[in-house]
Amino acid sequence: MPPSFLSFVYSLGTSALMLLGESPGQEGVSVPQSLSHAQEIIDVLTILETKTKGNLTQEEETLLQEMLYTLRIKYVDKASSSKS
């Protein structure tokens, strides 16, 4: 069964959360925090949001918007706390 758009967005979002130090890696494996790599994933999701506007189901659009909102908030929080 091919991956769905939902699983693709969820996978990218989960990867970004791990890079932000917000989610443990698979089987408790530690993932080093990397704000720059997390930002790259956020940028990719933003491009997807722009390029797919009007072509997504309500469920896909909601997941993408909520994932981006969560990632952006967590990114800003981590970036501002790392500068302190």
Image: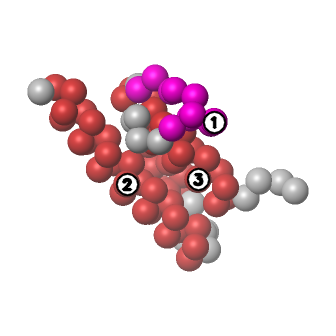
Q: Nearer the viewer, residue 69 or 33?
A: 33
Magenta segment, which residues? Answer: 24-33
Left/right placement of residue 22 relative to residue 80 reads right
Residue 9, percent from left and from top: 59, 53
Residue identifier under label 1: 27
Q: Residue furthest front?
A: 28
Image height of 18 relative to 14, above or below: above
Q: Earlier in the sequence, mark 3 or mark 2?
A: 3
Q: Nearer the viewer, residue 48 or 42?
A: 42
The local secondary structure at tag 3 comes to: helix
Badge 3, how many Cα within 10 Å: few under 14, some, many 20+? Answer: some
Residue 83, percent from left and from top: 16, 26
Residue identifier under label 2: 70
Q: Amino acid at mark 2?
A: Thr
Distance of label 3 from label 1 (alpha carbons):
18 Å
Residue, x 49% and y 69% (percent of image)? 62
Residue, x 54% and y 52% (percent of image)? 48
In terms of image quadrants, where is residue 75? top left
